[in-house]
Image (cartoon, helix red, strand yellow):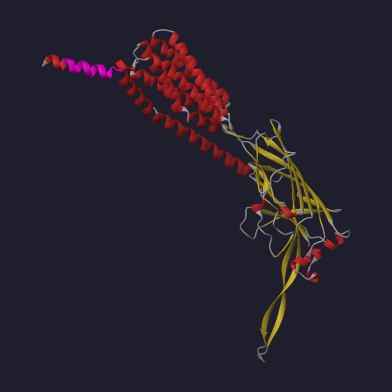
Amino acid sequence: MENQMQNENQNKGSFFQSTTAKMMMVGLLTLVLLIPLEFVKGLIVERSQRKKEVVDEVAQLWGKDVYFYGPIMSVPYKTYEEYDVTDPKTKTVTIQKKAVIEYAYFFPEKLNNKSNIKKNTTLKRGIYNNVVFSANMNFEGYFGKPNIEKLGINEADLLWDKATIIVKTTNLKSIKSDLNIKLNNQNLNFESKPEETETFYGTLETSQFDYKTLASNGKIDFNFVMQYNGSNSVKFIPVGKTTVINLDSDWESPSFEGTFAANDTTKTINKTGFHADWKILDINRSFSQQYAGKIPNLNEYSFGVKLIETVDEYQQNERASKYGFLVIGLTFLIFFLIQSISKIGIHIFQYSMIGLALIMFYTLLISITEHSSFALAYIIAGISVIIMISAYSISILKNKKFPVFIGLSLTALYTFIFVIIQLENYALLVGSIGLFLILGAVMYFSRKIDWGNN
């Protein structure tokens, strides 16, 4: 009986010392380490949200998206409403009319815009650099003879001497230029006008002018300049019968958006900035050149450019953390193969220390990134963790051959992940090829392990 119990204890001890049991424990530890890794991911999301709040706060003060809708010529006209008047003595009812002022709106025949958008990186709040821009926008074109026949308005009812020019735009508080427009040889000043409807546009309107006097040659040429502080995007509504937009900027990562695409033959994007042109004709969009009573909402026809950061530091940190499970798993696999091939014992506690060191890489990465570039932070955090694990491996493995191999393997792994993070279009392809090669290497080195005796 005593010999039987000793044999059972030996068998039990031999199982926990077997390769299978050690593999199970290392696999379980890998899953447990996903818990602190998730906390690190939560920290990245929290810091990213904090940056977004600061960026939104700065954008509110500096200037947000720039939308431009105009210029539009407004001409008041009279309409007549009939109403009944009853004589109190005779009780007879007569129909009378009263004049009501409405407005007719006319879009320009030609609208040209040349804009230069300059990136401003000096705006800093705390540890965050807020990337905003200043836009210098030059407009010119002309209004032709208004087509009042399409509106069904009697010309005698139009008050030509009370015409005005209207511009609808966002960021009124962030306009930095003098608000005036030149109509033929006459200069008029813009003044802000309260909106009667709920819209994100603000309205600028000139003082009144006499259209017939000013348009003696049949058209009114205009030109004016708008200078904005803004962020995120610049967009236009193509109100001209022919609308031509030319954008130049030192922003190296634009995203062209909206209903109309930029001209591919003239569009250029490089490290020094971009240039883009649009030419939109009235046949390219389905709205009229004149309206009576109300200016329509034409936001669905907007187009322009969104000025983006392709991958900011928190997005890069988040992408790096997604490979955390891969880094921990492959590092543990390297140690496990060394342990199995060399018969050197590695305690589960030592695996835990190695795993925690790997997780510390991500906390180092995000904290250093906030005070420098992502690339520099990645190098510092990577070197620190590789040196720590390699030095710890010397005491575990009792030689220098395996720690050198571990250090080189970790260097290759972190370099591989950094390359994937920097890539956009080829990240999946490079990642798939890299994992295939890693799997091939594991299969090659594991072929010497005698699994039958473990």
Quarter of the image holding residue 360?
Answer: top left
Q: Is residue 267 above or below residue 77?
A: above
Q: Position of residue 7 (x, y in %)?
A: 18, 15
Q: Is residue 283 above or below residue 60?
A: below
Q: Quadrant of the N terminus?
A: top left
Q: Report the number of discs.
A: 0
Looking at this view, is 266 or 304 the one in front? 266
Identity of the residue furthest to the left in this view: 1
Of residues 223 and 298, which is closer to you in this image? 298
- Magenta segment's dominant SS is helix
In the rendered image, which quarter is residue 255 located in?
top right
Whether residue 381 is visible to the viewer of this picture, yes or no, is no
- Which residue is at a point 67% across and 83% down the rendered structure image? 85
Would you say 307 lies left or right of 140 here?
Answer: left
Magenta stretch: includes residue 379: no
Horizontal relation, residue 133 to residue 225: left or right? left
Q: Is residue 376 visible?
A: yes
Q: In the displayed image of the protein, which residue is found farthest to the top?
A: 399
Expressed as whole percent of the image width and height from the top left, the position of residue 201 reads 65, 53
Direction from residue 208 to residue 6 in the image, left or right? left
| Residue in view at x 52 percent, y 25 percent | 433
Q: Residue at x 51, y 31 (%)?
A: 319
390 horizontally vs 171: left or right:
left
Residue 257: where, in percent of width, then height? 65, 44
| Span of residues in magenta | 6-18
Residue 9 sits inside the magenta stretch: yes
Residue 371 position, x and y percent, is 56, 27
